[in-house]
Image (spheres, rainbow, N blue to C red):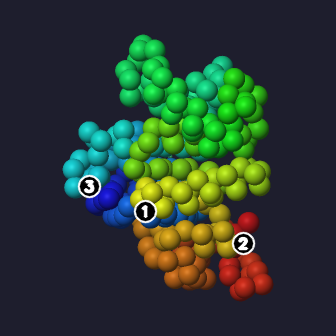
Amino acid sequence: MLTVQNLSVHYRGIEALTAVSLTLRPGEWVGLIGPNGAGKSTLVKAILGLTPYRGKILLNGAALKRQRSQVAYVPQRSQLDWDYPITAWNVVMMAQTRALGWGRSPNSKAKKLVSAALDRVEMLPLKNRSIGQLSGGQQQRVFLARALAQQPNLFLLDEPFSGIDKKTEAVMLSIFADLSQQGKTLLVCSHEWGEALNRYDRLLLLNRRVLANDTPQAVMTMENIQQAYGANIQALHNQNGMPFVC
Ligand code: ADP
Ligand code: MG
């Protein structure tokens, strides 16, 4: 179980997160939603120890710092340098190299894990492709494979559904369902607001603070969308009367 207590993050004068507290339980699939700039990526980076913060982050009651191997991260694609010359296989092997120690050559157990993870995301046939030569959806699947090969208990995924194809979406949804069944915890960032959010067990609505933390049905109200998305909102009503943002 992940517990975040009273977390605050400042970037030179900007208060990106204020007094954020939340709990993620085993097997839970939680959507972290909110507009651009709400602090979703910042929260994920704080959990990963990639940005300084105030407050407490605990995994199963102990400081997360010494248990980082339990946490896997699938970064937002737009934040990566895709010209970096590395194959799909080696991207996934990175998770193993860290476990084995840098400079150690991968053993057969590591190779099996990498192979199984690439197979699970249906990318094994393209394992020798340079990451930059893959489509957006294929790149996303390779980074998901890297997370799977790490065999963590907590998955942090930053906007994994942005700019991907239907096949990638289907593969990811099937994997997320499996992971949740296995008792793994998933925190998925999304800036979109719409019916797709019904797939989560719970939604955390963020805009610097946690504005709502409940079932999708309870969180997706007109009042909440206005509170979180404010004046920039383009709220529309679909056939079910549910507001969403384009
Ligand atoms: P989200 O992922 O919800 O779009 P972010 O966590 O990326 O939001 O950003 C939250 C706020 O912090 C924004 O105002 C953003 O401009 C600012 N911010 C994010 N990263 C940095 C950084 N490295 N330095 C300064 N400001 C940052
Ligand atoms: Mg972000």
Whether the residue under disc 1 has CB within 8 Å of ligand 2? no
Q: How far apart are marks 1 and 2 (CA)?
A: 34 Å
Answer with mark 3 or mark 2, whichever residue precedes in sequence: 3
Q: Residue at x 68, y 82 (%)?
A: 242
Q: Where is residue 111 in the image (x, y as percent from the top left)?
A: 52, 26
Q: Given this view, does label 3 or label 2 mark the residue nearer the observer? A: 3
The answer to whether one can see residue 167 in this image is: yes
Q: Quadrant of residue 193?
A: bottom right
Q: Where is residue 114 in the image (x, y as percent from the top left)?
A: 54, 32
- Contact, mark 3 vs mark 1 (Cβ under 8 Å): no
Q: Which amino acid does label 2 sit on?
A: Gln
Answer with mark 3 or mark 1, whichever residue precedes in sequence: 1
Q: Given this view, does label 3 or label 1 mark the residue nearer the observer? A: 1
Tell me the residue that label 2 is attached to.
Answer: 234
Q: Given this view, does label 1 or label 2 mark the residue nearer the observer? A: 1
Vertical relation: 10 (above or below) 238: above
Q: In which quarter of the image is residue 208?
A: bottom left
Tell me the residue that label 3 is attached to.
Answer: 60
User: Would residue 17 appear left or right of 134 to someone viewing this image?
Assistant: left
Tell me the residue that label 1 is attached to.
Answer: 27
Viewer-proximal residue among 218 and 70: 70
Viewer-proximal residue among 231 and 106: 106
Q: What residue type is labelled 3?
A: Asn
